[in-house]
Amino acid sequence: MNRRELIGNTGMAAILATGAGIGRAKAADLRPYERLDPVLQPYLAKHGLPALAAAVVLNGQIMAAGAVGMRRAGTQSPVSLEDRFHIGSDTKAMTALVAAMLVEAGKLRWDSTVADIFPELSGTTDAALKPVTLEQLLSHTSGIPSDNETHEKLLLQSYAQGELNLDELRYWLVKELVQQPLKSVPGAQFAYANMGYVLAGAMLERVGGASWEELVATRVFDPLGLKTAGFGPQSSLGRVDAPLGHKAQPDGTLKPMLAGPNGDNPAILGPAGTAHLSILDFAVWAGWNAGEGRRAPALVRPETLRKLHTPVIDMPPRPDAKPGTPSRGGYGLGWGNMMMPFTPEPFVFHGGSNELNLAYVMLQPKNDLAMVMTTNIAGAAADKALIALAEDLYQRFGAKR
């Protein structure tokens, strides 16, 4: 997998999810949930998926969950409900939530600009970029273009920057990125920009006094009890202890990608999409968001959470968008908003792919409903499978509400 493929697919995808989360163990223990394995199993052969996992949350309770298939195609290594799946750009909502916490703490404002946070770079920052705000970065309206060759070159150069921690490396990237011209006037157009999220993540690091990974782990993973959550390839180096991402080959076979330099996006892209977690923890994350402040922990005020979910700008239709990247609807702060043909209510949604995995999270806060689904392969067939599964799950658990 080349670096262009890696950065081109931290993208977000569309599907449904909502519900309420109160900690994975609690949500699972308070009430037995229906096993979805029989529902999921037929999707494997029909769509050529190595593995598939999904869960549904209603009113803060995990109602159904399942995981089927193999960690590694062609082997007998079955997945489980505790297995970690990569969620790609679904990570962006976590970045936006940390930003919201820092805003509520008075360390940052939604209208804090790049120049405000990095005044020492004023002499080299492109004039048009200086007034770009945190909110514009998180809503993809900053004017920073979508992933391109310049961004790819910067990522490749980052590997040669010596002994730097990730936050230091992101600051190096910021110093290079702020010199690049914008594609459009800030606030005027939507352009799905992973680099915009890296810049936003660096702003959080500056005011939060810690790396982005530390901020997310301590402010999101720990309070929500997401014990399986982490960053980077979902399997450990040298082990197949989680579903490996897979790459479809020209002859139709699937190539499993072990943990290593090509097993995920470059770590510097963390704020744009490197999180992984189990389907049960993914359900807790989705369910907590669907509750929009109805349940603990009170990480931000309910109105702040609703702000993250509310569209800032309409996304131009993109029928050719790669699975895991936005194709239509509106975009808020780390979350999209989209209608689906099988429901009268819109979904707050996000999706992500590193071109080896695909994950969708869909919420209906009005109904306190959340759905999450993941597979360890990306591409059109996986996208078709998750969309069909979303409709199936909605008809079983959400349509009667």
Image (cartoon, helix red, strand yellow):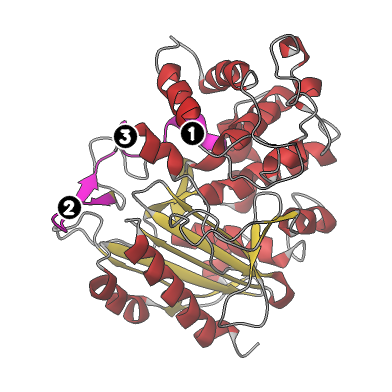
**Which residue corresponds to mark 2?**
250
Q: CA distance from mark 1 to mark 2?
A: 25 Å
Circle on res. 148: 1
- Residue at coordinates 86% horizontally, 34% vertically from top-left? 106
Q: Secondary structure at mark 3?
A: loop
Which quarter of the rendering shows the C terminus?
A: bottom right
Instruction: In this rendered view, identify the residue nearer to me: 28 or 59.
Output: 59
Circle on res. 2: 3
Residue at far right of view? 106
Instruction: In this rendered view, identify the residue nearer to me: 126 or 374.
Output: 126
Please say if 212 is above or below 325.
above
User: Is residue 19 something that shows in the picture?
Assistant: no
Please say if 390 is above or below 113.
below
Please say if 107 is above or below 352.
above
Task: Point out the frontmost of discs 3 and 1.
Answer: 1
Q: CA distance from mark 3 to mark 1?
A: 13 Å
